[in-house]
Image: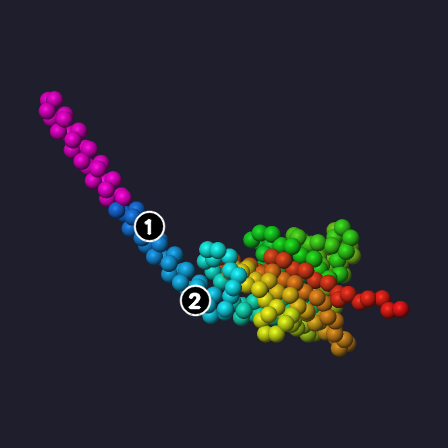
Amino acid sequence: MQRKTKFTATLVLLVIASLATSCNQVTEKAKEEANKIVAQTTESVQKVIDDLGLVYVEEGAQTIVTYDEVNAAQQAWCDALVKIGQIKEEGGDYKAFAEKVLSDAYNYDQGKVFFKPTLAYGDQTFRNDKKGALAYFVGGDPAYPNDKGFALTPWVKARYDNSGEKNEGIQIYGSVAITMGNVWVTGKDGKEVMVDKTWVFKKGKDGKLRIIVHKSSLPFAPATK
């Protein structure tokens, strides 16, 4: 009886050892596959860095914003601004569209946004939540009585231009890009207004660029004697 018990115990130990070895092999194989994926990702990221001639990129970046993506995001913002006013003029649900723009173009639904609109002031200068941003663009919120709806002017045309030549006004640091330049908006009367604009975009896990910082102001005009 004692000999049988020892045999059984030995068999159990052998089975456990076998399972442990098998698990270790699976774990090692999983690690190898993971390292292979990381290496491939790193290679693809490095290719983009080299192709764009980027110098300052965050260490360990797993995704890179491209100049084309940044320019497309800026133009999309300009187009959306015009579209909000157009929908209002046509009697459509401009507020719902503006809310969608804030979800698609800004990072409010994913995390933080720092937004300083052109015409905001006082204790409501900064609109770091979606409610405040929506009020600025379409008005109608009693919590923001001074907002008339910047997008409802309406603007019939909007364009942007970054500072410097070509893409000099864009800095890319991996998944984050910074732009500095101007936006021009044109009213129905044909008058064009220029504002100074700084944007910071971050690429999300879904591959979309969203605004995490938006700083806008009218150009400084020194007093004339």
Q: Residue at x 51, y 66 (%)?
A: 54
Q: Residue at x 11, y 26 (%)?
A: 4
| Rendered location of residue 7, percent (x, y) | 13, 29
Foreground: 160 or 145?
Answer: 160
| Rendered location of residue 61, percent (x, y) | 47, 57
Foreground: 107 or 223?
Answer: 223
Structural crowding at the residue carrying mark 1, measured as other residues with C-alpha within 10 Å and reported as few (<14), some (14–19) or many (≥20): few
In front of the other: label 2 or label 1? 2
Q: Residue at x 75, y 58 (%)?
A: 120
Q: Which residue is mark 1?
A: 31
Q: Is residue 148 above or below residue 187?
A: above
Queried whether the magenta region covers residue 10, the answer comes back as yes
Image quarter in which the C terminus is found: bottom right
The answer to which quarter of the image holds residue 33 is: bottom left
Query: SS of the residue at dot 1?
Result: helix
Query: SS of the residue at dot 2?
Result: helix
Foreground: 96 or 107?
Answer: 107
Q: Which amino acid type is shown beneath numbered disc 1?
A: Lys
Foreground: 88 or 114?
Answer: 114
Q: Which residues are magenta?
A: 1-24
Horizontal side of residue 137 vs 62, given as left or right? right
Outermost residue, right side: 225
The answer to which quarter of the image holds residue 163 is: bottom right
Horizontal side of residue 49 vs 26, given as left or right? right
Give the mark nearer the N terminus: 2 vs 1: 1
Q: Is residue 8 above or below residue 81?
A: above
Q: Main secondary structure of the magenta part?
A: helix
| Rendered location of residue 64, percent (x, y) | 49, 62
Q: Which residue is mark 2?
A: 47
Q: Which amino acid type is shown beneath numbered disc 2?
A: Lys
